Image (cartoon, helix red, strand yellow):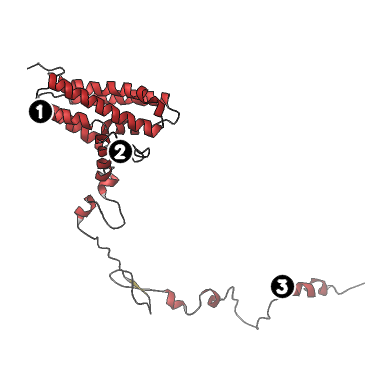
Amino acid sequence: MWQDTSASYAPSSSQNAYYHQPAAPQNAPLQFYDQSSFYPGSRSSLEGNVGAQGNIAQPGATGGFGGNIQPAGGWWTAFGTGGFEGEPPLLEELGINFSHIGAKSMTVLNPFRRVDENIMDDADLAGPLLFCFCFATFLLFSGKPQFGYIYGVGLLGSMSIYTLLNVMSEKGIDAYRVVSVLGYCLLPMVGVGALSVLVKLDGLVGYVFSSVSIAWCTYAASGIFVAVLRMSDQRLLVAYPVGLLYGCFALLSVFNVGGSGK
């Protein structure tokens, strides 16, 4: 028996409720989407006019964006405190910040002031290298060319202090900050080196000033290490190896190591 099944493939009334499609006119082109729903208005408003100088302007807009960017100042502006607009100064990108160097130097020169435990969050080596160079230069002017001894003792001493601090403390500290603290606290010893240019330190005056500088450097460095690592009950244990390190620098400033003795 033949049965007409063409109606079984036709959409039912329940399906029409979900899939309602408007009747398309005959011989109408296929349209996948209506451009007016995505782009209200004419599409020509989205197309800007690009001029010969690189300026992009839109019809009806009050102004355009220029393609030429002019710096706020000359090329020397990058070396100052302001730099170019929206960019840090070139010296800060190289790790040289004179305001931070001055703040840490004042902390060393005033060791009795309370030390902030976050003072070495922005540790740098610009100040320590500057102080070591000044110390070696002053000794050179006094007839003691000891650049190699200064950098050698500083390197071995920093490695030793770094090992001891990480063994003694629970928080730990990296070698970069250890070198930074020891270098900044060398500042009083730089004053002794400057004094050696004017006065012979191999005598009572030199012994007194060298002892004072050792105590000053040791007190400042141990205070910073204790504040950063929160080791308030172990300051004497930290000060002992640090004092030995600065004692070596004092010996280099008083005596002519490897010299002729004249």
Alpha-carbon span between mark 2 and mark 3: 69 Å
Q: Residue at x 32, y 21 (%)?
A: 240
Crowdedness of circle 2 by 10 Å Cα count: few (<14), some, many (20+)? many
Rendered image quadrant of residue 186: top left
**For residue 201, side relative to residue 95 (left or right):** left
2 vs 3, front mark: 2
Rendered image quadrant of residue 45: bottom left
Q: Is residue 175 visible?
A: no
Residue denoted by label 3? 19
- Quadrant for the C terminus in the image: top left
Q: Is residue 58 visible?
A: yes
1 vs 2, front mark: 1
Marking on residue 124? 2
Q: Residue at x 13, y 24 (%)?
A: 145
In-front residue for pair 28/191: 191
In-front residue for pair 178/230: 230
Residue denoted by label 1? 197
